[in-house]
Image (cartoon, grey):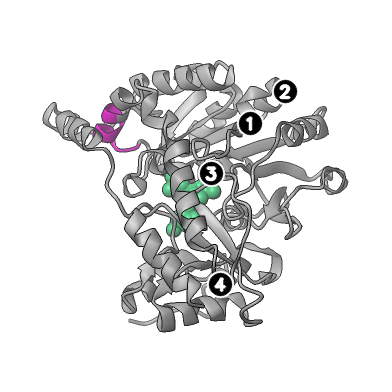
Amino acid sequence: MPHYKDQIPSKLPEVKTTIFTRMGQLAHQYNALNLSQGFPNFDPDPKLIKLVTKAMNAGYNQYAPMAGVLELREVIAQKIDTLYGQQYQPDSEITITIGATQAIFTIITAFIGHGDEVIVFKPAYDCYEPAIEVNGGIPILIQMNNKDFKVDWADFRSRLTNRTKMVIINSPHNPSGTIFSDQDMLQLQQSLTKTNIIVISDEVYEHIIFDGNAHHSASKYPDLASRTFVCGSFGKTFHITGWKMGYCAGPAELMHEFRKVHQYNVFSADHAVQRALANYLKEPQHYLGLNQFYQEKRDLFQSGLSHSRLKIRPCMGTYFQLLDYSEITQEQDEAYAERLVREKRIACIPISSFNTNGLDNHLLRFCFAKTNDTLKSASDILCSL
Ligand code: PMP
Ligand code: GLN
């Protein structure tokens, strides 16, 4: 094939294949235990699969409505109201998307243009910055400290300019496993009053939060909610990352702009899955038990590591555990992670890929959304390092 690399400049010259794809391929090549990309290695509830089959047999095989199946939007609105006390109108304030990734990309595309600044806290999940850059925006990176990954709100305020158009937050936080407190949310709300700054609150791990901590959704804070898109993912909550189903909730005027892009980007998300989720979500125990379920996995994994030379970082939410390997070696995290796959047959994610300028603090991320057998085998390997 002829190629035109020199004549057609890349819009994203610095972007490489994601670390998830690279580590996943390496894990496959070496037949390693794969605790890298975040997905469960167990099946979703058979009831949910039956509901999808039922929806397909009932004929829900053509396009869903553009904004999503109304019944599903209604049950999401009900759930947010019950959990966080905010009312969203199902018809105008909630849209079903192809995973949270599409929601985030579409929000950024709807609002960010050339020269607009978007604040991103680092380390950050990897889909934010390319979406900003491909739209001509400028990511303003605020690196959180490596000890407790707390935001310094005074520093945050000093980074706001008249070009700041958007802020992206993520709690529970991938990859650190930390959470925003009520105080953090109030600080954010307070810092943005009297501005027109839009917030993306990436809350895909809202139901994976431990030790009795509460999730402080942006939807709980009226002034914050009035400028925020809250993004959710059923992939995380129902062990169905491959179904790529998510949603966003936000005020009607903002959602109106969102849908202008959404309707030409994907038009709508999978119909049968939406019908199934509309039914499945009616029973709160289907998601309220998830904290306990993953807390047991976190505890099992952590206790298996008690004799290891890896230092366990606190994990308050998400299904990721950070481990500090600085007592074992001073190698770069990416090189060490690759060596672990080749020599120890275990795959993880090096944290430098989420940091500003690849900052390397010798931290590796392990996904514990795995069967107990896998977690035991993984901790045995890690104890041998
Ligand atoms: N945000 C964060 C923080 C994530 O970890 C993920 C997981 N992949 C996503 C967004 C994307 O979610 P989805 O798979 O629903 O697109
Ligand atoms: N959210 C998943 C993780 O953090 C990865 C999804 C992806 O591969 N883009 O591991």
Mark in front: 1 vs 2: 1
- Helix, strand or loop for disc 3: helix
Q: Could you tell me which secondary element the residue under label 1 belongs to?
A: loop
Judge: label 3 CB < 8 Å from ligand 1: yes
Is residue 273 found inside the magenta-colored segment of the image? yes
From the viewer's side, name the closer residue of 15 and 72.
72
| Mark 4 burial class by Cα count in 10 Å: few <14, some 14-19, many 20+ | few
Q: Is residue 117 left or right of residue 333?
A: right
At label 2, which amino acid type do we have?
A: Asp
Q: Main secondary structure of the magenta part?
A: helix
Is tag 3's residue or tag 4's residue first in the polypeptide sequence? 4
**Mark 4, secondary structure of its residue:** loop
Q: Is residue 157 left or right of residue 356?
A: right
Residue placed at 72% from the left, 23% from the top?
A: 223
Which numbered disc, 1 or 3, marks the residue that appears first in the sequence? Answer: 3
Say which label, 1 or 4, has the lower sequence index: 4
- Say whether mark 4 is within 8 Å of ligand 2: no
For residue 9, the mark is: 4
Residue that label 1 marks: 216
Q: Which mark is residue 104?
A: 3
Q: Earlier in the sequence, mark 1 or mark 2?
A: 1
Mark closer to the observer (3, 2): 2
Q: Where's residue 332, x and y in %?
A: 62, 79
Q: Is residue 62 above or below residue 346?
A: above
Q: Which mark is residue 223?
A: 2
Q: Are marks 1 and 2 in contact (CB under 8 Å)?
A: no
Residue 153 visible, this orientation: yes
Looking at the rendered structure, the kind of residue marked 1 is His
* Image point (64%, 30%), residue name: 218
The answer for how far apart the CA atoms under marks 4 and 2 are is 42 Å
